[in-house]
Image (tube, helix red, strand yellow):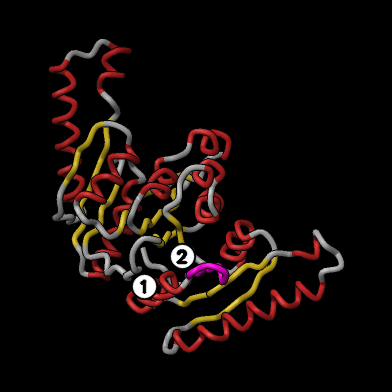
Amino acid sequence: MSYKKALVAINIYEDFQHILDSAKSIAQKLHLQLDIMTVIDNTAEFVPAAMDFQKSLQENARQKLQAIKPQFEGIRAEFHIAQGNPNHEVTHYAEENGCDLVIIGSHARHGLNLLLGSTANSVLHKSKCDVLTVRIQEDHPNLVTNYNKILLATDLEDDSAEVAKLAKKIATTFNSSVSTICVQGDPTIVTGIYGIVPEVQTQLTEDMQKKLDEWSMQYGFKGQRYLQTGNAADEITETAKSHGYGLIVIGSHQRGALGRFFLGSTANAVLHHAKQDVLVKKLKA
């Protein structure tokens, strides 16, 4: 798995320097071409007489992008301004211009924002290519991580091979170690439905641990192997936090919107709750 061209989406009205620094570091290590893009509101749709204001927004965006260009000397980078809904413009541009990775900032916010979804969340759902969310922490300086410790979340299904190959590529590039985590469902729920006795559950757990160990060895992952029980997103994010991982790599299926919108996906929940950067590998349904 090798990326060639990444779309870096920034909001010029928020602190975007950490996203740019992360994108530069990744581009240099992966030899990526970057398209750096910001999206401004189309105020003329709502206030027809606001053409002058619209022009001022465009000029402000142009000046901001012009100011950051010197930071990308030595990197193949182009700069673009789009107008409209950020969620649509970012995913549409990535698809139309052959980007195989979207890099976007993600705030550690909850509450109403968690319910309604953020730009990063919407891009994660709509994008047909992989998405790297760079975590923006408001409570301390943003330091670009070198991803020296990677946590790979897997369900050990057949398409997990694609996620494993991606994690291995990133690990090789950043000279990092990869640990793996697989989360089983709550055994008390299974017991209540099917009447499974503890001995059977113990055997199932041992079999799953053996499968995780063999799967990890197959790809040369020499880090820790965590077999947890409970809610997948909670276990993944808590493990990443408590053991100091800099990057979470996880797969996400491109399935219909209805169930995911109301119930959420593991990747979506990890995106919202993780304190680390999250790289989501898009898998075919």
Total numbered labels placed on residues in the image: 2
The image shows residue 241, relative to residue 44, as above or below, that is: above
Q: Does residue 86 appear left or right of residue 232 in this picture?
A: right
Confirm whether the magenta stretch covers residue 12: yes
Q: Residue at x 41, y 43 (%)?
A: 269
Mark 1: amino acid: Ile
Q: Residue at x 44, y 45 (%)?
A: 268
Q: Is residue 127 visible?
A: no
Find out whether the residues at labels 1 and 2 contact each other: C-beta distance under 8 Å.
yes
Label 2, residues with CA under 10 Å away: few <14, some 14-19, many ≥20: many
Residue carrying label 2 = 103
Label 1: state its secondary structure: helix
When asked about the image quadrant of residue 23, the answer is: bottom left
Q: Dot 1: within a 10 Å radius of its alpha carbon, few (fewer than 14), some, or many (20 or more) residues?
A: some
Identify the disc placed on residue 185.
Answer: none
- Residue 114 seen: yes
Say which of 184 and 168 sits in front. Answer: 184
Q: Which residues are magenta?
A: 7-15
Above or below, 215 relative to 9: above
Secondary element at tag 2? strand
Q: Is residue 51 left or right of residue 181?
A: right
User: Which amino acid does the dot numbered 2 rest on?
Assistant: Ile
